[in-house]
Every structure is written in structure tokens, then in C-alpha cells.
């Protein structure tokens, strides 16, 4: 029919079936190859990757890091540069000599160096896209890279440490999850589960009261605190308050100092979707990925003018939190000292607490936010929430089902969409709907079957990564249950789908290797290549049987070299 033909031309691919195997699948007429994988040298002085010992400490900050996540592409002096996050580590794979145990300061440093951010030049040759080894633009930013703390919390006593008594210079960025790009061409990396790196070596140390809301406990996930006192909260109780921010990196200048922008709040930042309001103010939408936490936006006080000054745009502005009403309206509530009874710096450091005080709507784990480039609307993946209606969030906020989070024990997730009033992303009000409720109509006949745009051919769960391409097609990546059993039968491995915002139609484009999450998406300057991230594969991807699994960025192209977004 002509409707099918129209849909086919809108999507530009024939949807693919689910997969449960150990590799990547793309539609007929498309190809893929690996661009960069964990441990691959960015500099020629790095030792080659070893299947037995992986990456040694000396080379650990000279190679592509572990667990690729959000990324953005830039053009610098005509060269293509990708800035990409390395979210966390899989210690059993990363430290094969100790079977995943951190037994020394060198083990800790190796892990710290494999995380953070890679900035790398890439180029397309006869064998496809590859890292330009030794490019003067290549850079690793790790858990130890010096960065400036800016905005209302800079210099606050709660951020001062023995090593930094002024409270304006932090070392490192961590658990870099999603990403974003500013209108002036810098990279935004988002600190998510920073809490997991801190612990206490002193059993008698009483954890400060504010730790609980952020999940900071006495035992770190990676043993950092045993070998690096900076991560030992009994010695450095303010150190965790210097993480949980959005960090700006200039990919064109490898000597630049990254900036932590505290005005954008402190929480488990997923990504940052920046857009310019009609009056020129910069709007940044953000999710806080935790069950029962919130969606935020930041609006600059100053306006952006191309080529004009940008230094204050992410430091001087107002943070808001979303309140959704059941009548499909909503408000962005300003987190001001008047509304919260907190000082400006406290709002920046304890944003979750401030948001609870104004009655923000508890959400089902807000993951990526995306803004449609061809229509004034925003989208947020609410990935899942097994606690909704079961227990309150860590702040004690009630988590009964509510408008955009209508299902208790929500294993499937949904994508909420909002339409800013007056077509203005700077507006304080909006209307909203659910773009999709994931579900399984082959198993359920109630709300868990999903919304009308879910069918046997496009089943998925736990939407997470999400990006619009330049044509206004919405690309959805998943990080969910890939057991392909029971309630998840027919969903297969994690995947990437494309959605048409106008019709709601969603079709499957790519499937990842088993055990992996598909996360991170960007395009080459000519839009003929789509770069996709494959994180934490369980299968021995991409090198096959007998080889260590290695998180990778792949390049997806059309065989006819036409544009892909
Ligand atoms: Fe790092 Fe919420 O995903
Ligand atoms: Ca994510
Ligand atoms: Ca996730
Ligand atoms: Ca992940």
C-alpha cells in the first residue's frame, strides 16, 4: 500500500527480527564494522592489547577506555573528532590477572584510567573508519584529570578538601553516562553513579546525613578507597560532593581544563539535551536516573549569540524540576531559595532534596532526554521501575503510580513527551503525552501489553539511549532484560529502533550481541555513517570465540553510501 511505501521511505530500512546471538545485525542493504574497542591504542606508545593480561597500568590512559556510552561528533579544522564516555568497568575482564579483584594501587589506577572520556580523531580509509593514532587531538580524561568547579557551588565549604582548600579544582570525572553537545561546539559529559566509587576504611566513621539520598555507602564497588585515600570518605568526606555534575570539555583543545557546571545540579546525571529558546537563552534538559527521582531543566540567564561569549551560559541560570499533572499539563518548577528554603549553592549540591521540597513528580528512572530538531517537543526515556508503588524513593517521596508513570512494577518502561507552551523551550509550562509504553502483547492483555504502537514485530524493553537524527527520526536504544523468556519473550538482545514522532510507528533497526547494551549514537559530518556504541557485551564481541569481550563503537553505513540520518 502507499502507506507502507511512505513508511518505508520515512525509515529508509526494512525492519529486522530479534536476535539472541553474539554479534550485531543491521537491515539488508546496510553494513557495519568496528571503529574502536576497549584497549585499542590512541597513541603508538601504548602496549598492544593482550588477551591474557588485557591492558597494563602504564598504557591504561593511552588506549580507548572501557564501556563506551554517550558520544558526540565534532569537526575540528576539517578533521572528524569523536568525544565518547567510558562509563564504568567490568573488573573480571579488565583485571584478568587478579580475577577482577583490586589488589593494589596499580589495579585501582588501571581502572581509573580506563574510565572517563576519550577524545579521538577518526578517519575513513579503505578499511572503513578507524582511530587516527597519535593525532594531536587525541586525549584521555580519567578519574584523575584536573577540572575546574564553576557555578553557584564553586568554592562552597562543602566542596573544600585538604588537597583543594578553595573548593574549585576537582580531580576527575566519573561514571560518565550519557552526553550532550553545546550550541558552541563543546562536549557535555554527565556524571551518573559516582556514589559507587567511594567507601570508608574506618568502620567507626559515621556517614554524613546527605549521603543516603545519593546512595553513598561505606563500601565502594571497586575497592578504590583501600588504595586511594581520596576515595576514602572517612578521610575525605567532602570528596563525593564534588561529583554528580555535568562537565564541559572542549574537544578542539587537548590542553583545555574541563569545567564542572554546578548550576546544572547534582544528581545521577544521564545526559544533557541542549537547545536554544526563541529569545536566545540556552535550555538544557536532564534526567536523574534513579527509581523515583526527577526530570530537570536548566535555563541560562544570558542569551547565546553565535560567535559571542559563552563562558557564563552554563554557570548563571535557573534550575527547574518537572511536575506532571494528570490532566496532561505540567510545570517546570524553579528551584529558588524562596521555593526551597535552601541557599543557591545548596540547591546546586543537593538538587534532589530541593526538588522534593517543591513536590516534583517521581519518575520511572529518567534516562536519555532528546529534543526534536524539526518540531518543538522533548522526549525522555523512563526506562523501568520495579519499586513503583512498592517503596518510596530514597528521599521518602511517595512513588504511587502517576500520570506519566502509570504502571506499578514497571519492567518495560515508557517514553514521555512534552510540548512546551508557545513552542518555547524556555516556557514554564507544557502539555505532555506518552509517546510509547513498551510492553508485551504476546504475554499480557492489560497495561503491560504496551501502547497501541507496540506489536509483535517491534518488541523491546527498557528504552535508555535516545537521539534524534537531523531529519527528525527518533532513535531508541535499549538496556534491558535480554533473557528472551517469560515477560520478555520475543524481545531478544538489546537493540536500536527508530520511531516516527508524527505517526508513533517504531521499527527495529539493529540488534546487539547478547549481554550487551546498545548505547551512544552520533553521525559523521556527511551523515553517511552512524556511530553506535556496544557496551558490556557478554559474548566475545567483536573478535569472536576465545577472545575477551570488548565494548566497542561500530560504524553503520548503507551499502550504497547514502545518508543514514
Ligand atoms: Fe548510565 Fe542511566 O545509564
Ligand atoms: Ca544509560
Ligand atoms: Ca539503563
Ligand atoms: Ca550502561
Image (cartoon, rainbow, N blue to C red):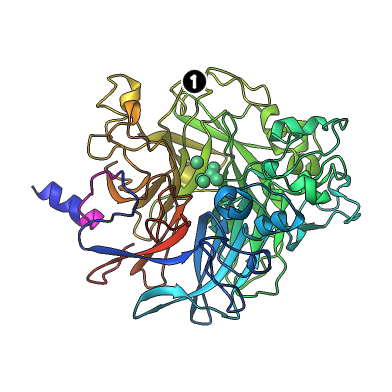
Residue 254 left/right relative to 499: right
Give the answer, above or below, for where 298 lies relative to 550: above
List x then y, in percent, for residue 332.
59, 37
Which residue is label 1 attached to? Answer: 401
Residue ID at (44%, 47%) = 538
Q: Against 411, is 446 above or below?
A: above
Q: Is residue 145 left or right of residue 445?
A: right
Whether residue 371 is visible, yes or no, is: yes
Q: How packed is label 1: few (under 14 Cα within 10 Å), some, or many (20 or more)?
A: some
Residue nearest the viewer, comparing 202 with 236: 202
Element under disc 1: loop
**Measured from the top left, where is residue 191 in percent x and y?**
64, 49
**Magenta stretch: dominant secondary structure:** loop
**Residue 187 location, x and y as percent?**
58, 63
Q: Residue furthest left?
A: 1
Q: Is mark 1 within 8 Å of ligand 3?
A: no
Q: Is residue 226 above or below residue 534?
A: above
In the figure, residue 158 lies in which quadrant?
top right
Residue range of the region highlighted in magenta in the rendering: 9-19
Q: Nearer the viewer, residue 216 or 338?
A: 216
Q: Is residue 315 visible?
A: no
Give the image location of residue 129, x and y in percent: 40, 73
Number of marks: 1
Quadrant location, the C terminus = bottom left
Magenta segment includes 53 = no
**Residue occupying image coordinates x 23% and y 45%:** 17
Q: Residue at x 28, y 56 (%)?
A: 26
Of residues 536 and 379, which is closer to you in this image?
A: 536
Amino acid at each position: 500500500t502507499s502507506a507502507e511505501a511512505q513508511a518505508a521511505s520515512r525509515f529508509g530500512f526494512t525492519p529486522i527480527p530479534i536476535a539472541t546471538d553474539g554479534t550485531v545485525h543491521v537491515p539488508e542493504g546496510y553494513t557495519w564494522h568496528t571503529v574502536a574497542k576497549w584497549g585499542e591504542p590512541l597513541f603508538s606508545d601504548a602496549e598492544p592489547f593482550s588477551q591474557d593480561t588485557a591492558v597494563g597500568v602504564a598504557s591504561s590512559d593511552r588506549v580507548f577506555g572501557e564501556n563506551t556510552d554517550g558520544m558526540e561528533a565534532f569537526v575540528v579544522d576539517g578533521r572528524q573528532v569523536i568525544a565518547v564516555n567510558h562509563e564504568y568497568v567490568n573488573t573480571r575482564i579488565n583485571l584478568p590477572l587478579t580475577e577482577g579483584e583490586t589488589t593494589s594501587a596499580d589495579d585501582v589506577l588501571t581502572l581509573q584510567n580506563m574510565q572517563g572520556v576519550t577524545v579521538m580523531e577518526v578517519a575513513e580509509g579503505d578499511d572503513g573508519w578507524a582511530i587516527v593514532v597519535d593525532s594531536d587531538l587525541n586525549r584521555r580524561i580519567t578519574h584523575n584529570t584536573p577540572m575546574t568547579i564553576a557555578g553557584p557551588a564553586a568554592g562552597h565549604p562543602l566542596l573544600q578538601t585538604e588537597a583543594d582548600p578553595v573548593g574549585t579544582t576537582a580531580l576527575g570525572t566519573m561514571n560518565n553516562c550519557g552526553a550532550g553537545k553545546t550550541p558552541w561546539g563543546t562536549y557535555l559529559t554527565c556524571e551518573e553513579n559516582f556514589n559507587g566509587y567511594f567507601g570508608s576504611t574506618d568502620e567507626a566513621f559515621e556517614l554524613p546525613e546527605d549521603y543516603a539520598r545519593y546512595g553513598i555507602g561505606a563500601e565502594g564497588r571497586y575497592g578504590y578507597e583501600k588504595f586511594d585515600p581520596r576515595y576514602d570518605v572517612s578521610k575525605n568526606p567532602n570528596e563525593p560532593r564534588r561529583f554528580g555534575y555535568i562537565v564541559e570539555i572542549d574537544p578542539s583543545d587537548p590542553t583545555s581544563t574541563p569545567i564542572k557546571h554546578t548550576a546544572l545540579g547534582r544528581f545521577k546525571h544521564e545526559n544533557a539535551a541542549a537547545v536554544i529558546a526563541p529569545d536566545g537563552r540556552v535550555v538544557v534538559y536532564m534526567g536523574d536516573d534513579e527509581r523515583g527521582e526527577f526530570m530537570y531543566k536548566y535555563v541560562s540567564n544570558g542569551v547565546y549569540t553565535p560567535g559571542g561569549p559563552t563562558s557564563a551560559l552554563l554557570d548563571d541560570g535557573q534550575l527547574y524540576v518537572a511536575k506532571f499533572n494528570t490532566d496532561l499539563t505540567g510545570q517546570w518548577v524553579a528551584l529558588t531559595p524562596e521555593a526551597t528554603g535552601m541557599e543557591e549553592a545548596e540547591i546546586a549540591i543537593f538538587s534532589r532534596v530541593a526538588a522534593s521540597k517543591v513536590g516534583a513528580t517521581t519518575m520511572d528512572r529518567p534516562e536519555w532526554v532528546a529534543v526534536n530538531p524539526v518540531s518543538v517537543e522533548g522526549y525522555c526515556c523512563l526506562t523501568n521501575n520495579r519499586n513503583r508503588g512498592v517503596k518510596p524513593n530514597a528521599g521518602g517521596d511517595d512513588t504511587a503510580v502517576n500520570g506519566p508513570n502509570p504502571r506499578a512494577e514497571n519492567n518495560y518502561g515508557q517514553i514521555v513527551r512534552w510540548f512546551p507552551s508557545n513552542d518555547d523551550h524556555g516556557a514554564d509550562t507544557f502539555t505532555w503525552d506518552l509517546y510509547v509504553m513498551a510492553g508485551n502483547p504476546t504475554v499480557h492483555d492489560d497495561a503491560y501489553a504496551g501502547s497501541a504502537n507496540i506489536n509483535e514485530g517491534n518488541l523491546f524493553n527498557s528504552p535508555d539511549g535516545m537521539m534524534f537524527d537531523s531529519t527528525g527520526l527518533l532513535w531508541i536504544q535499549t538496556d534491558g532484560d535480554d533473557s528472551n523468556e517469560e515477560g520478555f519473550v520475543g524481545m531478544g538482545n538489546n537493540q536500536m529502533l527508530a520511531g516516527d514522532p508524527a505517526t508513533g510507528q517504531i521499527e527495529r533497526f539493529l540488534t546487539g550481541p547478547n549481554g550487551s547494551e546498545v548505547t551512544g549514537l552520533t553521525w559523521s559530518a556527511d551523515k553517511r555513517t552512524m556511530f553506535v556504541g556496544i557496551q558490556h557485551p557478554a559474548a566475545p564481541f567483536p573478535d569472536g570465540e576465545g577472545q575477551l569481550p570488548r565494548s566497542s563503537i561500530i560504524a553503520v553505513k548503507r551499502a550504497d553510501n547514502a545518508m543514514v540520518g
